[in-house]
Structures are given as C-alpha cells and as structure tokens.
Image (tube, helix red, strand yellow):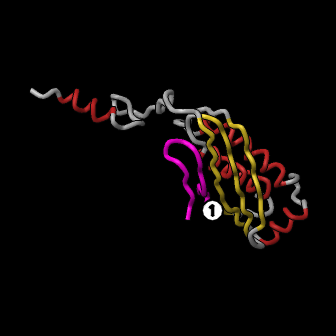
C-alpha cells in the first residue's frame, strides 16, 4: 500500500514556503550566497492642487511633510520584517527616499534600498514607499480627506540568484 502521508510530505517539501504540515514557514536562506542587492520601488500620492501647494510652501500645520515622510519611509524599510511575516531581518546598508512633483495633484515617491545579504530587499523598498505615502496622508488629512495612494510597484532589483529585474 502506498504511504499517502509520505507522498504529501514530499510534495510539500518542494514548496519553499510551506512546511511538512502544509503551513507557512520562513524560507531557509542559510546556504544562499551573500551578495550585493538593490531594490527600487515607487508610488504616487494623489491630492487636491491646494494640498500640493501647501506641501510646497511648507504650510501644513503638522510640519514639513516631506521631511517627516522621508524619515518614516526609512523607518518603514528597517521595520519590514516586523510587518511582513515571512520577511527575513536584513542588514540594510542604505535607504534613500526621493520625492518629485509629477503634476499639480501627484506627488511621486521613489525608495532605493541596498544590502549585502542572502535575500533581496524588494519588500523593504515597497514598504518604504508605502510608509512614506501613508505619512504624507497622515500629515495632510486635516486639509484633504480625498488623498489617494496609487501605483506602488517594484521598478528594479539587482543581485541574487534570480538576477536583475526591471519593469518595462
């Protein structure tokens, strides 16, 4: 008679994020090579033109929106494994957050995250953009409840076994 449990266990072992019981697990990266890795993500915060003007003038009552959002984005990248359950804690070597006015209603955010580690920093870059965008919302919500956060996406990654990726 075929041991069905053994077959199920073998099938589950082939899935990197599931244990022998079929439950989620953090992938073992112990044997992966330490390499330089970079990830770049972006997103957009949409708001009323009046809100954008207040940000540009530094007139938001809570303070300098972009300075606070920049620090928040950096903190977000560093806290990613505490927020996303299967992310590994990494030795992040650099986080850079950039803002650009894309139009009179769109603020662009770009996060670049680097590490020398066994796994990539895509989630850290995406989290940095997300937290920076949420901070812009928090800082401006008293004057604009219609703010929308859109287009958060990975645009580039380098390093690791899977190599480089660049969004077309």
Where residue 23 sits: x, y (%)?
39, 33
Q: Residue furthest left?
A: 1
Identify the residue at image location x=58%, y=44%: 159
Where residue 56 sits: x, y (%)?
87, 64
Name the residue carrying label 1: 150
Residue 62 vs 120, above or below: the answer is below
Identify the residue at image location x=59%, y=55%: 154
Where residue 152 sits: x, y (%)?
61, 57
Using the image as rendered, state which of residue 52 and residue 61 is in the foreground.
52
Identify the residue at image location x=90%, y=61%: 59
Using the image as rendered, state which of residue 71 and residue 93 is in the foreground.
93
Q: Which corner quadrant of the image does residue 156 belong to? A: bottom right
Under circle 1, the secondary element is strand
Q: Residues within 10 Å of mark 1 (few under 14, many from 20)?
A: some
Residue 150 vs 111, above or below: the answer is below
Where residue 71 sits: x, y (%)?
79, 45
Residue 165 lies in magenta, yes or no?
yes
Q: Which residues are magenta?
A: 150-168
């Amino acid at each position: 008679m075929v041991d069905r449990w053994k077959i199920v266990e073998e099938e589950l072992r082939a899935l990197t994020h599931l244990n022998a019981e079929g439950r989620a697990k953090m992938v073992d990266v112990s044997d992966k090579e330490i390499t330089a890795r970079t990830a770049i993500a972006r997103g957009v915060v949409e708001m009323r033109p009046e809100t954008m003007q207040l940000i540009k003038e530094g007139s938001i009552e809570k303070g300098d929106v972009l300075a606070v959002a920049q620090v928040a984005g950096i903190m977000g990248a560093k806290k990613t494994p505490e927020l996303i359950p299967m992310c590994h804690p990494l030795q992040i070597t650099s986080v850079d957050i950039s803002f650009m006015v894309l139009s009179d209603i769109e603020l662009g955010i770009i996060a670049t995250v680097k590490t020398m580690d066994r796994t990539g920093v895509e989630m850290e870059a995406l989290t940095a953009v997300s937290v920076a965008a949420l901070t812009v919302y928090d800082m401006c919500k008293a004057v604009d409840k219609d703010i929308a956060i859109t287009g958060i996406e990975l645009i580039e990654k380098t390093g690791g076994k899977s190599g480089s990726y660049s969004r077309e």
